[in-house]
Image: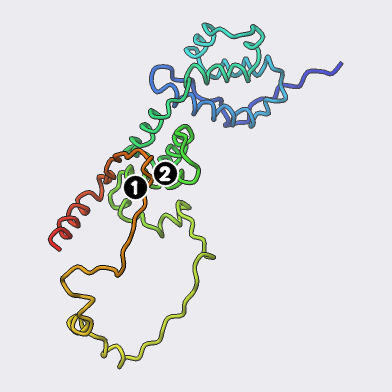
Amino acid sequence: MASPAQIAFPIQGIHPPSYLDVKENVPGHWKTLKQAWGNYAITINIHQQSETYQVALFLHSIGPEALKIFNGTSFDDAQDREKLENIITKFDELTIGETNETYERYGFNSRIQSPDGTFDAYVAWLRTLSQTCNFCERIRESLIRDRIVFGIQNPQTRKRLRARAAQRMKLLIIHGNNFNSVPASKRNKAVVHQLLTVQQVVTQYPKVFKSQLGHFPGVVKIEIDATVQPVVTPTRRIPTAPKEKFKKEVDRLQPL
């Protein structure tokens, strides 16, 4: 008969996760505790221990308030209470429940960097929140970058967050094979002085710069499907940050 696995004492400095906070933001705290528990379990090789030992250590780690919740929770099968995987699944159901996509996206889009939080911690939070928003994988990173720009506290950092900085922080990936290298043309200084002025260009090409609207030759026929029901789509919303610049540009174009 095989002897039971010897219980390994925790590595010095490695402690169980903090108790589960069941008073506020329970889903967020549970996600963090679940991740911390997974790391802790790997560190102490908990898989070498019996199922009973694993369940007992987990219930001890989540704290007395969460233990009361466990005691008052019903399982489909009484034996499910003795399996750690089923217990964690049950806490997923109790704390998170069915994911509300709209609410999860609201939480993602309203998340801003805390005044005393680091930039790395803020990015980590956004990546965690994006997992439950059902974002398309093709645009997930783009949405995270947009949220970073709108949510960071330091305005100077926001201004510097351009393509080069985003590339260094691995928020932007540039594929060099998509670019062709073109050697810079060597200009003669004498040629530079011979460049036309704006007035010379307008005078030399009067048909291009005349004030009347032009038109293409020929007749264009647009065919439509008469069976298609027409719809009215809402106007494209302008983000808050560039709204003032957008208005100024529209005002500038209107008199033209």
Q: Quadrant of residue 87?
A: top right
Quarter the N terminus occupies: top right
Residue 179: give x, y in percent of width and height.
49, 68
Query: Looking at the image, which is closer to me, 42 or 130?
Result: 130
> How are the residues colored?
rainbow
Query: Looking at the image, which is closer to me, 19 or 122?
Result: 122
Q: From what the image shows, is residue 181 above or below residue 112?
A: below
Q: From what the image shows, is residue 228 above or below residue 88?
A: below
Task: For marks 2 and 1, give the CA distance.
Answer: 9 Å
Q: Which mark sits nearer the N-terminus, 2 or 1?
A: 2
| Callout 2 amino acid | Ile
Q: Which mark is residue 144?
A: 2
**Side of 63 relative to 145 (left or right):** right
**Residue pictured at 51% horizontal, 16% vertical:** 63
Q: Which mark is residue 44?
A: none
- Residue under label 1, please give it: 149
